[in-house]
Image (tube, grey):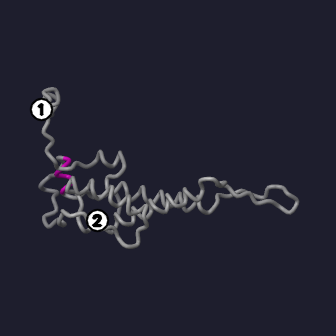
Amino acid sequence: MRGRKKLPTEIKLLKGTLRADREIKDAMNPTKIIDLPYPPEYLNEDAKKEWYVIIKEYQKLGMISNLDLGILGLYCNEISIYIEMTNKLRDKDRVMVFKNPDGTVKYAAQVPYQKIANDALAKALKIASEFGLTPSSRTKIGTGQNLDNDDPFLEFLKIK
């Protein structure tokens, strides 16, 4: 598919860019989760910690549904793989040097743990941007919450 990814109607509404002529009439509206869901069984302790940090924030904002849980589990798993590999690399060399029989350097390569860590981080960042977990992706969505502010200066700055 070419071009930009389509934004959900809810996000367009929050951003103030929703146009009735471009709205999907039968858009999918999944039910938001009220109670904290348990993390998937396959997650290790590091992944479960990440799960609860994220799920608690999204629960407060009312921005998570059952449909989001599977991909959130994958994100948490990738973060835990990154943490595990980083811990394995903590006091080790990150480059392997291969030598010829005469002792000269043949070539150097990353240790496998470094490659696994890099891949897990890249996957986690890709998923994180879908969830608004990176600073730049958070600027593209709103929460739909009305923030009451009695500051007259902020009221003055509002665009009508």
Expressed as whole percent of the image width and height from the top left, the position of residue 62 reads: 19, 56
At a point 46% along the width and 61% down the height, the residue shown is 80
The label on residue 74 is none
Q: Residues within 10 Å of mark 2 (few under 14, many from 20)?
A: some
Q: Nearer the viewer, residue 105 or 53?
A: 53
Residue position for label 1: 150
Instruction: Tell me: residue 91, above or below residue 34.
Output: above
Expressed as whole percent of the image width and height from the top left, the position of residue 105 reads: 79, 55
Q: Nearer the viewer, residue 9 or 65?
A: 65
Q: Looking at the rendering, in which quadrant would you find the N terminus? A: bottom left
84 left or right of 8 in image:
right
Magenta-tinted stretch = 10-15
At a point 11% along the width and 35% down the height, the residue shown is 160
Q: Which amino acid lies under the numbered mark 2 shown in the image of this protein?
A: Asp
At a point 27% along the width and 53% down the height, the residue shown is 57
Q: Which amino acid lies under the numbered mark 1 shown in the image of this protein?
A: Asp
Residue 32's image quarter?
Answer: bottom left
**Any magenta on residue 84?**
no
At a point 64% along the width and 58% down the height, the residue shown is 110
